[in-house]
Structures are given as structure tokens and as C-alpha cells.
Amino acid sequence: MSKPVRVAFVMEGPTDYVVLRAAVRALLDGRDFEATNIWPELDENLRPQTEGGWGGVYKWCRQVLEQAEGPARDNPIFALNDMVVIQVDADVARMKYKDYGIKDAPNDDLPCEQDCPPPSATTDALRAVMLGWLDETTVPPHAVLCTPSKNIETWVLVGLFPGNGQAKKSNIECRWGLEVQLRKHGLMKGAKKFIDEYRANEKGIQDAWPSVREKCSEAERFSTDFLALVPAN
């Protein structure tokens, strides 16, 4: 019997964790896995106990580097897990460090938004920024970067509501404001995301993951990178 795959998650918030956990479950296709939410820390109801948002991911990366006392890739967190998923939505490419009150950024590399299409122009730039937070130039072993364009709600919309008019449009990864559509379906109100509604739809996201991969290039990239690290049975 194969050992469970150990997957750790570093993400902006709890709803991102639900979406990514559903994606991983779909990718592993019935194989057991142990999911650990590293950052932000979540209670049993998936309520955050530590700082979330992209700035929280930035601070986690800097802590990993500091604790390694050398290259970030030498931090035991990577060796202790089969995969460490690090997620930042591509709308962060529009941000400035001062927007989050960050004054000690190692590089002045935000904003880094590029023309879209292709979405990869911006996500490639953002991935380079994320590696800079770790003081790395290549992705550490066991790490998987996840950069939904423009945000992970695009994946949710495509997966759960394929009949939605906006979900049917081309270049969906280049479209802003798609989270408005999730408000219509009860998953959000204003900027607030309802974690219980996301959890109730987790199986639906899992089942729809092949369609999300087909429609969203960043979901396909994440899936390909993740599967490349799955240990043999």
C-alpha cells in the first residue's frame, strides 16, 4: 500500500485552500494524501489564525529564508513534504509593496503586470517575484508555484458554473472582475468570501478540475508541475 502524499499549502486565504485541496484531490485521482495548511494557520473551521493575503505569503517566504540560514531550498519544510504549494493570485502583479505596508522587500519588482493575453506574460513575471522573496532563481525542490490569473475565483467560476455567460468567453484569464459572478451564485457578498459555501462546493470543484485545466492555462501549468513531483507508489 502506497504512503499518503504529503502536500503542504501556503496560500493567501482559506478559500484558496479549499480550491487547491479540491484540485490536488482530483490530480491524485483517489490516492491518499495528507494536507497541511502551513500559512495562514487555520482552525478546524478553516478560519485564519495568522496573517493572510499576499503579504502574508511574502512574510512566510522571508521567514523560510531566514530560518534556513542559507539557501531557502535548504529549509527542512521542503524535505519534510512531497510538495509545498505556494499560491499567489496574479492580480498581485498590479500591487506595490507599500500597499501591504512592506518596507523591507529585497527587490523593487512590483508592480510587474504585463499585457494579457497571454496570461503567462504576467504570471511568469510574478513567479520571478515570488522566487525573489525566497532569494532563489529557480523553484526549490518539492515546491510548486501556483499563480491563478487574474485570481483563483476564475477557476471556481469555470469549474462550478460553466454555463455562466462570463465563463463562456474567450481569454477568461485576462478578464477582471469575475468574482462578481460568484456573488450571483452565493459564494461571495461584496469582497467577503463565504468559506462554508466554498467547502460545500469542494467536491464540485474536484469533479470539474479537468474542465478548469482545459479552460485556464495557469490551472494546467499548476497541474503539470504538481504531477511531476508526485512520488511513485
Image: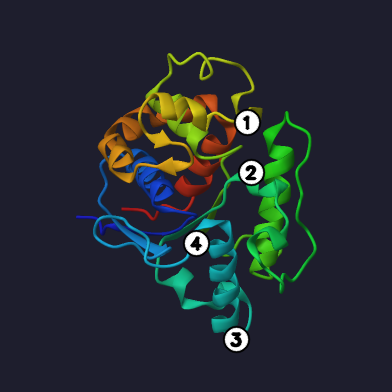
Give me the disc on residue 91: 2
Q: Position of residue 50 (x, y in %)?
A: 42, 67
218 shown above or below 58: above
Q: Local crowd at mark 3 within 10 Å, few (<14), some, or many (≥20)? A: few
Q: Is residue 195 above or below residue 73?
A: above
Label drawn at residue 142: 4
In this rendering, would 68 be left or right of 192?
Answer: right
Query: Circle 1 is placed at which residue position?
Result: 176
Q: Quick one: SS at disc 1?
A: loop
Q: Report the amino acid beneath label 4.
A: His
Q: Earlier in the sequence, mark 1 or mark 3?
A: 3
* Residue type marked 1: Trp
**Residue most toward the left?**
1
**Mark 3 or 4: the one toward you:** 3
Q: Nearer the viewer, residue 230 or 57?
A: 57
Checking the image for residue 62, the label placed there is none
Mark whose residue sits in front, 2 or 4: 2
The crowding category of the residue bearing disc 4, from other C-alpha atoms within 10 Å (few below 14, some 14 to 19, many at least 20), is many
- Mark 2 residue type: Asp
Quadrant for the N terminus in the image: bottom left
Residue 121, quarter of the rendered image: top right
Query: What whole-number distance in Å separates the C-alpha atoms at marks 1 and 3?
Result: 40 Å
Residue 156, quarter of picture: top left
Cα separation between marks 2 and 4 = 25 Å
Q: Is residue 96 left or right of residue 219?
A: right
Residue at left offset 73%, top offset 31%: 116
The answer to the question of whether label 2 and label 3 lie on touching residues, with beta carbons closer than 8 A, is no
Q: Residue at x 47, y 37 (%)?
A: 190
